[in-house]
Image (spheres, helix red, strand yellow):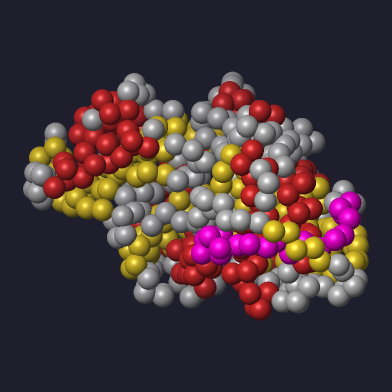
Amino acid sequence: MAATGVAIKEVATKPIDGQKTGTSGLRKKCKEFMSPNYLGNWVQSLFNALGAEAQGKVLGLGGDGRYYSKEAAQMIIKLAAGNGFSKVVVGRETIMATPAMSALIRERKLYGGLIMSASHNPGGPDEDFGIKFNYSGGEPAPERITDKIYGETQKVSVLKVADIPDVDLSKIGSTKFGSFEVEVIDPVDDYLAVLKSVFDFALLKSFVSRKDFRMVFDAMHAVTGPYATRILVEELGAAANTVKDGVPSPTFNNGHPDPNLTYAHELVDIMWADNGPLFGVASDGDGDRNMILGSKFFVNPSDSVAMIAANYKTIPYYKGGLKGVARSMPTSMALDRVAKALNLPFFETPTGWKFFGNLMDADKCSVCGEESFGTGGDHIREKDGIFAVLAWLSILADRNKGVPEGGHMVTVRDIALEHWKTYGRNFFSRYDFENVSTEAANKVMDHVKEVMAQTPKGSKMGPFTLDIADDFEYTDPIDGSKATKQGLRFVFTDGSRIIFRLSGTGSSGATIRLYIEQYTADAAKLEEDAQVALGPIIKIALDLSKLKEFTGREKPTVIT
């Protein structure tokens, strides 16, 4: 039932092919979203799928500020009013980081939220746009909803559009149209309140505001600039120049807002300079990913989640202990070793935050992470870049409590070395081959499957002895659902691993991801360069896959 006092226009439409929705929503080229009824069809299909359950409810709205967001927001508001929502709560200028939307939904008990983002993919008229729905727990929509959305996109015939003017999204406040309301809010407030319930802001401020502490937060012209400025500078007293590229740009300043050593090279140059800052971080387009750096030191994301878990006592939210920890299958086994040492429940899941969400809702997981620069906790139901930043600052603040200003501070490198001396080091690297033709990518994966079928347990592959060769499957311990074909794995008797996956996070082509891992407890090798330490097993992986032969690529697009 539509809002009262508002005229509704029924706009005829026809199904548009290719609107299948995953847990990351729908991602396509921006021009496709801008074509007639493309966005409207998907949003109407979502509302049709939700049905009577959504009537009279409140919907959150926001995103990473990428190109077309403001126009899309006005259309979504009109469709929400035409489909029975009582209110839309939208971030000022459409800004709302993905973890902030999860926090907003949970804090205000919203029915759900729409996030306009294509995550770490570039933005602009010739680049990517995306939209996804998060449900009432703040989590990405479950498959039962995304499957319904897709079904509705195949039969949608009418768009129910409220005949109301555009809303000024630059000013905080409420606007009413009959019984329907639009409230524009500060996008940081609710998220900050959640973070203050997790971390000791007084301790963080005493550390961050030290005269001998310097850090850089590279927002990459994306959504986290306003969040980092408010939290790090205004709340915690960091220097005014702490936040780099902190004004969100619709095109991310024509950059690629992916926080890794390749795309965040400007931050890397700053951190590798002599007398550089003690701490450096980068976040992605929508604020759910993070990269952690020390002075001339990179913390692999797989190690980062393990180190946060090992140091959980520095975070007040976890004063009662951790319920459990989890990682995605391709993520290194560093977290496994922490879980074993701390006698914690441990879970290995497919890639996808929804699997962690199920564990969190069942009180079985407190800290989790993915090697793709995603780290999170059970305070919300999304990965959370600024959570990881504040977790690392908490560890640094704790370690430097007794160090006077001007004294020798404990560094990120010191913390990593301490961790490796305790647990050993899982050398890990990921090779991304981006925008490979689908045909070539499938040839690689088919060939790897043939190699697996012809290589029995006990076979020698260079100096390694094969233990397991399979396509990873997962049965969810909470709801019993089964996920298959989650990655081709070669696991060796010493714990080393080679993994191949196709990624679907781009809007076109395919990305082949190759993951390589090898463990050492040898103190003399802990500081070896990962690419050197992994050299022999990387060669085995490239040779067995014939990746260069099938794709024509001499080297990966990105090395992590």
Task: Identify which residue is drawn at 36% across, 49% down.
Answer: 330
Q: Considering depth in this image, is 332 or 488 the residue closer to the camera?
A: 488
**Percent x, y of residue 16:** 56, 52
Task: Identify which residue is drawn at 41% across, 38% down.
Answer: 511
Q: Is residue 437 above or below residue 52?
A: above
* Quarter of the image where the C terminus is located: top left
Q: Considering depth in this image, is 537 or 552 the residue closer to the camera?
A: 552
Q: Is residue 153 above or below residue 414?
A: below
The answer to if 155 sits in the magenta stretch is yes
Task: Identify which residue is drawn at 32% across, 33% down.
Answer: 440
The image quarter containing residue 108 is bottom right
Q: Which residues are magenta?
A: 149-168
For residue 143, say whether it is visible: yes
420 left or right of 497 in image = right
39 left or right of 382 in image = right
The image quarter containing residue 213 is top right
* Quarter of the image where the N terminus is located: bottom right
For residue 560, say whether it is visible: no
The answer to if 409 sits in the magenta stretch is no
Task: Identify which residue is drawn at 55% across, 30% down.
Answer: 263
**Percent x, y of residue 409:** 60, 38
Q: Considering depth in this image, is 450 or 368 the residue closer to the camera?
A: 450
**Percent x, y of residue 317:** 61, 66
